[in-house]
Amino acid sequence: MLIIGEIHTALLPHSRPLTPEEARTALALAVGETVVQWARPVPHTASPILLHGVDCRLPLGPKRGNPHAEDAAPASSVRAVGTVGSRAVLTGGHLLQGSAWTAVEPPEHPRRMPWSHYLARPGTLETIGNFDARRLAEGYLAAESRRDRAGLLNAAAIARHSLHDVLSRPGLDQRPPIKTGSTRLRWAAIADPGAGRAVAFRLVGTDRRRMSLVTGPIEPEQVAAAAEDLAVHDWLLSAVSARIALAKIGEDPRHTLRTLRPVVDHLLHLWSAGARTSRDLEFMWDSLERRPGLTRQWTTMTERVRSQIDYGAADLAAKMLDLMEDRQRQTGAADQHYHLSRAVPGRCRRAGRPVRPGASCPRVRRTCGSTRARRCRAGPRRR
């Protein structure tokens, strides 16, 4: 069995995170269906699964041993009929995802069946023709570069459909706390009981990612949840890295503090790698943590962000103290001049004789700073 899907991840255009009640209302995309929510370790809300009927073509990858034989050829595709599942997911009240996935299986009949046959198997596509899971997975992951992509399965449009359903809801003030872009993850998983487990994750440009997975028998929704978990954490890495690049570290401390402060307030607490991944797919995170090491990169960036916040705050505090000392010094000099003009003679305890304030002290050879010459600022007289 082959499972394919696509996920779009972006920041919710709202100035604050949605509460669980607001998230439940925003993601109620189907009347009478249940919105699923989790509270630990990070608040997580998933909308009901919507089904979309499709009758389209799936791209095929090159044949084994001849990688250029059918490269981007219009005939290298197979017809598929069935339904695609989609849903919207909100993590931490801030990160919104539109997800679409389906399971591709070999046909039970050599011809196209009525829609009742396909609706009885929700979230499943049946091919009409030869079924090769490996070629279908390779073709789907590289479908965006094909010339005939207009007639192929467009999982991105289905994923955006769920995303736009949430964004069109009233109540969002359209003032996101951080200006960031979105990312797209296209993934394909081959469920083969006899094959070994493997995962490959690749960045394609600035906003596109690809993931291929080989696993044993598993439910398609579990693979979709694991891919959504990976997409969230990849978006966090991309967003924080972009903010660090814009912070002008070492050039302008105030700009650095203003740029990185929203990252601390809204993003750093959302990292929880593998929290939504089933036990059957834990090997995926184990492999990704070894190489490329997503959590290591996250730890390095968060330590850098926090250190810059600390340094910037300390620098601004030092500047404020300098300004306060300068103002105190100016105010103190004015007050001292006022008091000295109204002072009366007294006895200096250090000199041991009467002296007028402002006169030269015979002991320390400097002007007496006491307003009434009753307390010597140079210290008590030595005997």
Image (cartoon, rainbow, N blue to C red):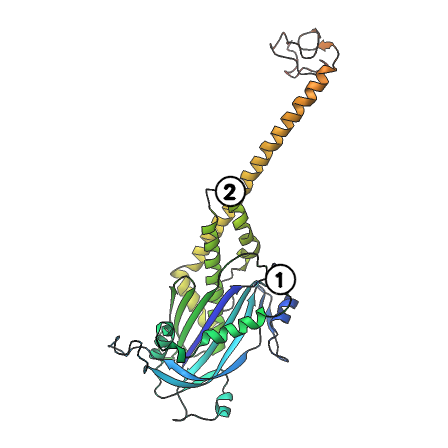
Q: Position of residue 36 (x, y in %)?
A: 59, 73
Instruction: Identify the residue at image location x=55%, y=70%.
Output: 89
Horizontally, is 369 left or right of 287 in the view? right
| CA distance for labels 2 and 1 | 30 Å
Q: Residues within 10 Å of mark 1 (few under 14, many from 20)?
A: few
Horizontally, is 343 left or right of 192 in the view? right
Label placed on residue 253: 2
Q: Position of residue 297 (x, y in %)?
A: 43, 55
Q: Which residue is mark 1?
A: 173
Tag 2: amino acid: Pro
Instruction: Identify the residue at image location x=66%, y=68%.
Output: 21
Q: Secondary structure at mark 1?
A: loop
Question: Image height check: is 259 above or below 222?
Answer: above
Question: Image height check: is 172 above or below 250?
Answer: below
Task: Choose mark 2 or mark 1, whichever is in front.
Answer: 1
Tag 1: amino acid: Asp
Q: Which quarter of the image is occupied by the N terminus?
A: bottom left
Q: In this figure, what is the number of numbered marks?
A: 2
